[in-house]
Image (tube, rainbow, N blue to C red):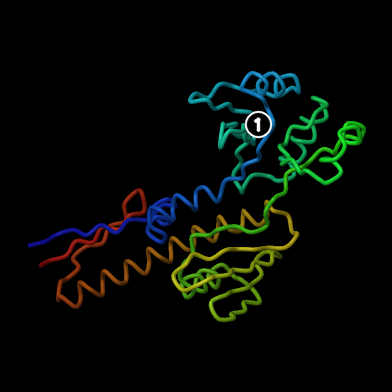
Amino acid sequence: MTMSVCILAIPLALAVRAVMGEKKFNAWIESNTMRFATNFKNAKDLVQTVKLAGYDAADFGNNTYKTHIDKDLWFLWELHEGKWQANFNKSDDTEKIRAFFRDLQHKSNRQILYVAPQRTQAARTTTTYAQAAPPRPKIEPVISKTLPTIYADRDTLLATLQKYGAAGVQVQGLDVACWIDGVQLNFTQPAPGVTYELSFGEKDSRAVYDTIRRLDEGYRSTVQEQTYENVKKKLDEKHFIIEDEEIMDDNSIVLTVSI
């Protein structure tokens, strides 16, 4: 008698869920979103302002609008926590984002990004001074240099870094530091089993994200290899004989065993 065991080539979403669980996965998705709150009064104000600045603001349904910065980068405007917010992914080009907001605020001659009000003692005691004060400079978005990752196991992370030629690897407790393609990467794990956070210096963010994409693929591949070896070990312990191994189009591995 034979049976087949399918070992999936874990795609990104499934890999993250497998490592984090559903609740932490949703939090990870949210943490990968950069939200920039604005002071648009309503959807009409948003659409008119964006279009007058020369950008599109297409109705994307469900109270959401889509804007292209250029042919390669677009984002969604959404009403979030009572404010219209521009939602970007942390892998998006940060320089393009800054340039977009500079251009939008310059062309509309107004502050677009929301600034939380700060009441000083002078502002409370005199209205005349507040009215006479010069306008605040235009605010630009602050881009985080710390990213969440899908990595939860130090040994698997180290194996992945070694596979991709990381140089100067240093391990201090749970934390790992290294260089890849001239980019310094620092992986910090608050506690065993918790996913690592990645921090990096002032290198080009795009280069960092490109490196991380390659590492993610390598990490998932390592996880699959470990799963494959563990399944084979379990089958061997039960004295099952593997009669056939087949790699499917989606890179799944199907093992046919006799029982």
- Residue 212: where, in percent of width, then height? 58, 58
- Residue 18: where, in percent of width, then height? 37, 59
How many marks the image carries: the answer is 1
From the viewer's side, name the closer residue of 32 and 165: 32
Splitting the image into 4 quarters, where does residue 234 fall?
bottom left
- Residue most extreme to the left: 1
Splitting the image into 4 quarters, where does residue 96 fall?
top right
- Provide the secondary structure element on which disc 1 rests: loop
Q: Residue at x 68, y 27 (%)?
A: 40
- Residue most extreme to the front: 125
* Residue 238 against residue 94 in the figure, above or below: below
Q: Residue at x 49, y 64 (%)?
A: 195
Splitting the image into 4 quarters, where does residue 136 fall?
top right
Instruction: Answer few, some or many: residues within 10 Å of disc 1's Cα (few below 14, many 20 plus, some between 14 and 19).
Output: few
Q: Residue at x 43, y 66 (%)?
A: 222
From the viewer's side, name the closer residue of 50 and 40: 40
* Residue 69 against residue 227 in the figure, above or below: above
Q: Split into 4 quadrants, where in the image is the C terminus?
A: bottom left
Q: Which amino acid lies under the numbered mark 1 shown in the image of this protein?
A: Lys
From the viewer's side, name the closer residue of 18 and 106: 106
Question: Disc 1 designates what residue?
Answer: 71
From the viewer's side, name the closer residue of 228 and 99: 99
